[in-house]
Amino acid sequence: MVWKPQLETKTKTERARMDNEKPIVCVLDASTYVGFWILKGLLGRGFTVHAAIQKNGETEIQKRIREMEKVEERLEVFVVDVLDYHSILLALKGCSAMFCCLDSSDGYDEKMVDLEVRGAINVVEACAQTETVEKIVFTSSLTAAIWRENISSEKDVDEKSWSDQEFCRKLKLWYALAKTLSEQAAWALSMDRMLKMVSINSGLVLGPSVAQQNPRTTMSYLNGN
């Protein structure tokens, strides 16, 4: 019998990482507007990136990311289902950080609220199951902190500020409710799993367009929905 050594197989980004001092990080969902620009920023700063995109049909942003993958050695695309944390684990292989940017391009309703909360929980749980992820950067929204009765009486918004869930339900502020509940769930689970997490609660996000598409999330924000 002839003994043949087993060669360790490495992913495209792991091979690129060998020649790069900066660690591998994951962006999920990289095909959202915020996720795409985080992806671009990380690549521009020399990071190796796992771009995780959801199974929701091939959008214009996803096509753009696929084109980038063909020419960028430090980029690898993974298709994930956020309701299945095992698929998220594949995208997290070798990563030291997760940039979580969940969003719905089709707008928000009560069902979407539940899906986003479950997705956030699975992302954090997947990070907890790895041996390499050191931090989660969770992109939330200012709407997770400001919606309540007598909103005009609030002078400051800080980490203790949360939107009132019943107020959001009464006015059908589904986007705000999704961001509130998903961030709260992410915080609770990350603390339970002893993971380092930071949340970024941005206001209205504007910038260069990535693709010609209907910005439903932005319109929902402007309309207070």
Image (cartoon, rainbow, N blue to C red):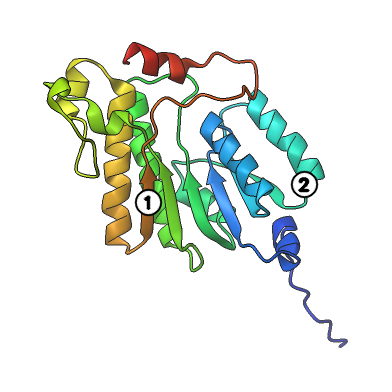
Crowd tier of the residue under label 2, counting other residues whose Cα lies within 10 Å: few below 14, some 14–19, many 20 or above: some
Q: Residue at x 81, y 43 (%)?
A: 71
Q: Can the viewer see residue 83? A: yes
Q: Residue at x 47, y 27 (%)?
A: 205
Residue type at mark 2 is: Glu
Q: Residue at x 35, y 11 (%)?
A: 223
Number of disc labels: 2
Quickly name the residue at label 2: 72
Compare residues 202 and 53 and report the one nearer the observer.
202
Indicate the quadrant containing the N terminus: top left, top right, bottom left or bottom right. Answer: bottom right
Q: In which quarter of the image is residue 32?
A: top right
Q: In this view, does 89 lie to the left or right of 111?
A: right
- The correct choice, above or below, for 80 with respect to 109 in the image is below
Work out how far the residue at label 2 is from the one at label 1, CA to CA, in angstroms. Answer: 28 Å
Q: Position of residue 78 (x, y in %)?
A: 63, 45
Compare residues 18 and 8 and report the one nearer the observer.
18
Q: Position of residue 37 (x, y in %)?
A: 59, 36
Crowd tier of the residue under label 1, counting other residues whose Cα lies within 10 Å: few below 14, some 14–19, many 20 or above: some
Q: Looking at the image, tell me whether mark 2 or mark 1 is earlier in sequence order.
A: 2
Q: Where is residue 224 in the image (x, y as percent from the top left)?
A: 31, 15
Q: Quadrant of residue 220?
A: top left
Q: Are marks 2 and 1 in contact (CB under 8 Å)?
A: no
Q: In this view, does 184 lie to the left or right of 133?
A: left
Q: Position of residue 81 (x, y in %)?
A: 51, 40
Quickly name the residue at label 1: 198
